[in-house]
Amino acid sequence: MEVTIERILPGGLGIGHAEGRTVMVPLSTAGDRLRVEVERVKGTVSFARLVEIITPGPNRVEPPCPYFGRCGGCDFQQLNYQAQLDAKVHILSDCLRRIGGFESIPDFQIVPSPNPWHYRSRAQWQYDSIRKRLGYFESGSRRVCDVSECAVLAPELQQTLERLRQRMHEGSLPDEARDFRAVVGDDDVSVAASVKSRDRGTSPTVREGSDLPVGANEVTRSIHGETYRLNAETFFQTNDDLLPQLIDTAIKDASGELAIDLYCGVGLFTPPLARRFARVAGVEADELAASYARANLANAGLVNAEIANQNVSDWLEEALENSSRDAGFDFPRVTAQPEPSRAQRNIQVRTAGAAVQREAAEPPSHIDFLLLDPPRTGAKSRVIAGIIRLKPQRICYVSCDPATLARDLKKLTAAGYTLDDITAFDLFPQTHHFETVAHLSI
């Protein structure tokens, strides 16, 4: 069938209409006249693969990556960079209107990446030990696309990939490894591997250069005047060039008595918040990330912030219980902590004595500022409900998925919050992904 692509939809697919059907085509551009083959039908929608470009759209360019179309990583390389940015603006607007129900959207811009290529400072490579392949999953499958050079990797990660590939060809990578994760630090690269566990418990990790199951090596990252310690087993944003602007846009001129940082990770936003507010509560479910968040606060000499290693929904419920029982808001106290891992014990030993015990103070009567940066699935309904009941005066929602962002903003505005402003950041050039910062107030 032949189809003309009309626009790019959330998820990166191009949409067109032909033979009375709606047709979705990946790796397409607006204005493309394509010959496609239907692979799957759902109702009146056909999902097709591109067979031939009959007439290219005005914004189509030749993808420079030899793996484009097979590797599942980059799906926007066929678009010139301005067209990528324009498509992302349209995607966000579409989600806010269609999913969020917003009739009026604040004017917003997308901040381009200074480096559309070689920007990724964090990566995960899949490993097929039987076929000796190392790279990324092929699009729509669990097959490993063997990649020797990746056009979006930072130079340090490209060198790391080459070293791992050399070890693979030498036969010195552990056969039980499933994937390798890597993150760039100021002076080193942290590498860890998930291994195939014989039981169904947590998989140990393998450090580069060793076949022993040990923790990943630690690195430091200097971002916008703050120093963060982390390793490849923890999450950190992937585009260093835009992080200072992302932090400034998220926090803006916020200051006051109390700020909450939900899904805080290793604390990207927590130290900057602790410099603006009298008290800060950070919440992170991952044990290792929470340990690093505490260490990063201690190393910065910030003693007015606490990190709870707890599920965000549970923490909010405790916060609501405390606020209803007391005159104001107080931090939930975690009474039982799990036995720390070896990596966590190392972090705790290195930071022992660095923090000063905060003197008891009267709980604030309200929450001035709440920041949440949830995973791609967005915040759970319990989390949004808890935030609404806590009634922070200002909310900053940092999101990597426009659809779940729109869903959650709809709930917040229905509860009386006003969507004040939005800024998008192109943290992921050559893909349909991007980051959004939204501010709300009541």
Image (cartoon, rainbow, N blue to C red):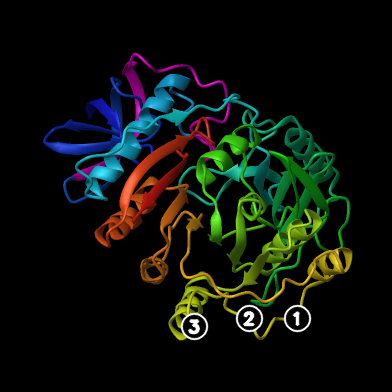
Sequence-first disc among 1 and 2: 2
Mark 1 packing: few (<14 Cα in 10 Å), some, or many (20+)? few
Q: Where is residue 214 in the image (x, y as percent from the top left)?
A: 84, 64
Nearer to us of marks 1 and 2 is: 2
* Image: 383 above or below 238: below
Tag 1, which secondary structure? loop
The outermost residue toward the left is 20
| Residue 357, position as x, y percentages in the image | 77, 72
Element carrying mark 3: loop
Callout 1–callout 2 Cβ contact below 8 Å: no
Q: What stretch is highlighted in magenta?
A: 45-74
Q: Which amino acid does label 3 sit on?
A: Asp
Residue 334's label in the rendered image is 2
Percent of width and height locating residue 105 = 27, 39
Q: Is residue 11 visible?
A: no
Q: Name the residue under label 1.
A: 339
Distance CA(mark 1)–CA(mark 2): 13 Å
Q: Residue at x 33, y 37 (%)?
A: 91
Q: Name the residue under label 3.
A: 326
